[in-house]
Amino acid sequence: MRDRQAFPNPRCLLKARRLATIAGALALVALLAVGLIQLATRSQGSDAPKVRLTVAQMQAQLTTSPAPLAALHAQASELLGGGRRALHARLTALRGWPIVINKWASWCEPCKAEFGAFQRVSLNLGRRVAFLGIDSGDSARGEPLNFLRSFPLSYPSYYDASGQLGVEATDSRNTPVTVFYNRAGEKYTRQGAYPSAAKLEYDVEHYALGA
């Protein structure tokens, strides 16, 4: 007798297809969940402040600073005039203190990327290190003032419309540039934006504090 050929039951085929569809949907949901977790992890590791602090909140965190540093915090996020003479007078008043000078501009996208790191590290180390900014190359004060309202800092910046003060202070025409002075007045200059608060804090400890 010839064997009968077995044919799949249509109900079994339909059930198998439904199970395959459900399995595919579950796999897609799992992939999306993994992607969202990775995105959240990256966001948590970024240097943009999770809750942007106000100037008053930053000043409150630095109330126990020594007098020369407290004078900086009293001018938090201000854009100061006076040019070369004013900056020189401030550096003279800070002689013997570790100093960090960051040159930035409102049109500088890398500057925006690193401002979260400067906000965080200047709060962490602001009782031991003097932080200053130079707004270099902005032709009018309106844009940098808006910039500082969006990215407030615990220290002031000096307005440098021509860009010359920034070049003299950093020995560079690039932006951003960060200069470190240790207590002995020895200078180290770093070109480019900081990729993380951890890298900036390491350099402050190493070049300004000499740790």
Image (cartoon, rainbow, N blue to C red):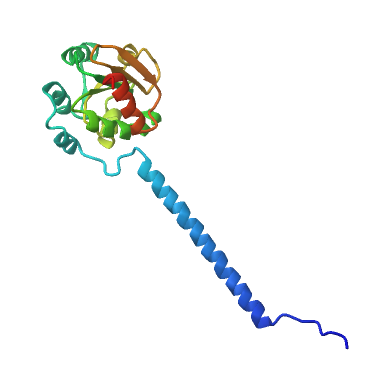
Q: Position of residue 206 (x, y in %)?
A: 31, 22
Looking at the image, residue 202 sits to the left or right of residue 10; the answer is left
Residue 124 picture quarter: top left
The structure residue drawn at horizontal position 37% and vertical position 40%, both measured from the top left corner, is: 46
The answer to whether residue 112 is seen in the rendering is no
Of the pair 92 and 187, the residue shown nearer to us? 187
Q: Quadrant of the N terminus?
A: bottom right
Q: Residue furthest right?
A: 1
Is residue 50 placed above or below 11 in the rendered structure?
A: above
Q: Position of residue 32 (x, y in %)?
A: 48, 56
Residue 113 picture quarter: top left
Q: Quadrant of the C terminus?
A: top left
Looking at the image, residue 6 sits to the left or right of residue 99; the answer is right
Looking at the image, residue 12 sits to the left or right of residue 137; the answer is right
The structure residue drawn at horizontal position 28% and vertical position 37%, both measured from the top left corner, is: 150
Q: Residue furthest bottom?
A: 1
Is residue 186 placed above or below 12 in the rendered structure?
A: above
For the image, the number of numbered tags is 0
